[in-house]
Image: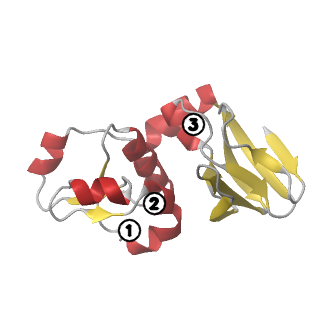
Amino acid sequence: QERRYAAGESIIVQGEKGDVYYIIKSGSVVVLKKMMEDEAEHVATLHEGQGFGEEALITGAPRSATVQAAEETIVWTLSHDEFEHIMKSSFLDEISGEEALKKEQPDFLDVRMQMEFDEERILGARHIPLDELRKRYSELEQSREYYVYCLSGARSAIGAFLLNSQGIK
């Protein structure tokens, strides 16, 4: 379905249940994330062709950020079932840690928080916390294949989905 939002209008509100994935047809949005009692922090600006809302659909957790239209914006939406059928199955490929370690010169990408990365990590792994991934796509090479990991698999699934949606395997 196609939906239209006015500048400043909220599309997603942090903390709500997520049941829709969005792809920007035209316009742009800002992603704002509130940590604890702090003011909402600008996390990213997304433009035509980019998607958002995947995290709640992949993990089943409440929305982790608020997304507002930066200008008049038109989005296409996919229901949770449509997302599962079309997007998730096309963009995620899971392998075990043992299989990844057997690969010749694997590029590991750790999407955990800095504190977790400092505590323990795979030797040689690149660290880009999930909250920073959208801002740091340019640090990754399109020609390489990355093995994304975290502690439980939820953040790595989101990270892998985001990378694949940008053409990074």
Is residue 125 something one can see in this rendering? yes
Nearer to us of marks 3 and 1 is 3
- Marks 2 and 3, how far apart at CA: 22 Å
- Marks 3 and 1, how far apart at CA: 26 Å
> Tag 3, which secondary structure?
helix
First along the sequence among labels 3 and 1 = 3
Residue located beneath label 1 in the image:
142
Q: Nearer the viewer, residue 87 or 44?
A: 44
Which residue is located at x 73 percent, y 43 percent? 13
Which residue is located at x 64 percent, y 48 percent? 65
Is residue 146 something one can see in this rendering? no
The reply to whether the C-beta atoms of the residues labelled 1 and 2 are less than 8 Å apart is yes
Outermost residue toward the bottom in this view: 139
Residue 6 located left or right of residue 168: right
Q: Measured from the top left, where is residue 44 in percent x and y? A: 62, 64
Residue located beneath label 2 in the image:
167
Q: Amino acid at mark 3?
A: Ala
Which residue is located at x 20 percent, y 38 percent? 96
Q: Nearer the viewer, residue 102 or 45?
A: 45
Q: Measured from the top left, where is residue 33 in percent x and y? A: 63, 54
Q: Nearer the viewer, residue 118 or 124?
A: 118
Q: Quadrant of the C terminus?
A: bottom left
Residue located beneath label 3 in the image:
56
Q: Amino acid at mark 2?
A: Gly
Q: Amino acid at mark 1?
A: Gln
